[in-house]
Every structure is written in C-alpha cells, then in structure tokens.
Amino acid sequence: MNPEPPVVTPEPHVVTPSLHLAAGSPLLLWRPDRPWLAISSAVHGGGIGEREWVLNATVGSDYRRDDPGDHVAELAAACGLTGTGTGLLTALDVRRQVTTTDRGVTVTATTRIGAHCTWAAGDEELAWLPGTINVVAWLPLRLTPAALVNAVATVAEAKAQALREAGLPGTGTPTDATILLCPTTDPFDRYGGPRSVYGSRLARAVHACVSAGLRTSPMS
C-alpha cells in the first residue's frame, strides 16, 4: 500500500524555465536558488545527486558531435553557470516546449520523435538520428532513492501511453532522456509508481505534455 505522504507547498520558482541563447541556439534554463536532488539520464550530470541547474538545449538536425556531455558543459559556461548541473540536447526548437502542472508536480517536455519512434524491445539496431523526448520534472517533496528510480519508470510508462494513444509504432526514441528533481530536505515519500500520490500526478503531467507535443511537433 502507498500511504498518503505529507501535504506540502509546491515550489513555484521552478515551474517555468527561462529562455536563453547560446552559440546561436535557444536553450531552456532552470536555476533554483538552492541545490535540488536529481535523478538524471542526461548526457551531462547524469546519475543521482544534488544539482544546481538544469538546461535543455536545441541542436541542429545534422548534429554529429560525439562529445555531447562536453557540449552541454560549453553551453553552461556560455550562460555563466557554475557548480554541478545536468543538461539535455534535442533537435526540437525548445521554444516549442510544453509545461504542465498537476497538483504541485511540474513537467516540461520537448517532444520530437523524428523518423525513428521505436519499440523498446525491437530487434532492429537503428543508426543515430535526431529526435528525442526530453522530460524535466519538479516534485514538491523529497523522494527516497528507490522512489526516484520508480518515478523514472513512471515517466516512461506515461510517455509510452501517449505514443500509443497517438497511434505511433513505438514506446519512444533511442535517445529519450529524463531528469526528475525534488527538494533535499524532509518531508519525504517512499513511492514513485503510477498509483502513488505524487507518481500519479507525475504520470498525468508527463502524459499531457507528451500528448500535446506530439500534436504540434514535426515527425520527420
């Protein structure tokens, strides 16, 4: 069973990212006033730990750098960022982001599946192509490490549901990435699955963002 976690006040200052230009390309930047606990699959700053900033940057559809993590570090430096952060890259113009809040859980997604929506357990080995569904989510209370891992799975399930409902043949792209962030202090919750209190809010917000992005973003 998933007991009801403490009622907390959402963190309003992380709901909306700011838009910047770096190296001629737009990027979304979140810079809270204190470090947040993150779980991230991003090319820069991935893993679990405290992060001081998050960015999601647009790259060209012909992007071929083989050091994307270093590229994110360069973009961060161009924005004057210091400390430990985590960052994503996408072929979508990030100004087409979709943000949704569900009872304290705020999700921003950039959705561009390109020509390579694929099944997670497919047999084919696809060459790298631009695309990517990037999800950045802020939760208003701390999750335990196990709950953070569970919440990442919840994001994947909600994204796959949106793709199925859109009639697309796959569960995502080969380069989808997720960043989840929460406060570093109590109160805390032990659960992040889709029927937990905050996991269900996360799932609904991700589903809404990705569904909206699929309706408006290029598919090739």
Image (cartoon, rainbow, N blue to C red):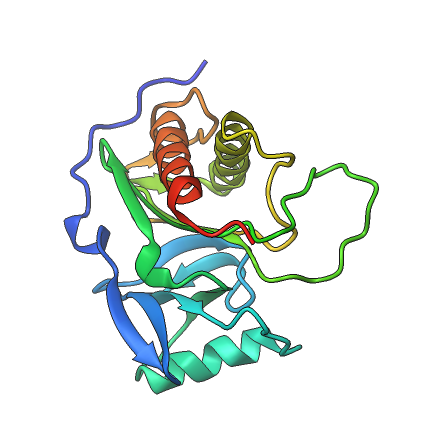
148 w.r.t. 17: above or below: above
Residue 53 versus residue 27: which sits nearer the camera?
A: 27
Q: Residue furthest top?
A: 1
Q: Quadrant of the C terminus?
A: bottom right
Q: Position of residue 173 (x, y in %)?
A: 61, 48
At 56% from the left and 57% from the top, the residue drawn is 131
At 48% from the left and 72% from the top, the residue drawn is 59
Q: Position of residue 43 (x, y in %)?
A: 56, 66
63 w.r.t. 187: above or below: below
140 w.r.t. 55: above or below: above
Residue 220 versus residue 155: which sits nearer the camera?
A: 220
Q: Position of residue 64 (x, y in %)?
A: 64, 76
Q: Position of residue 10 (x, y in %)?
A: 19, 41
Quarter-of-image position of residue 55: bottom left
Q: Residue furthest right?
A: 123
Left or right, 66 with respect to 159, comes to right
At 52% from the left and 49% from the top, the residue drawn is 219
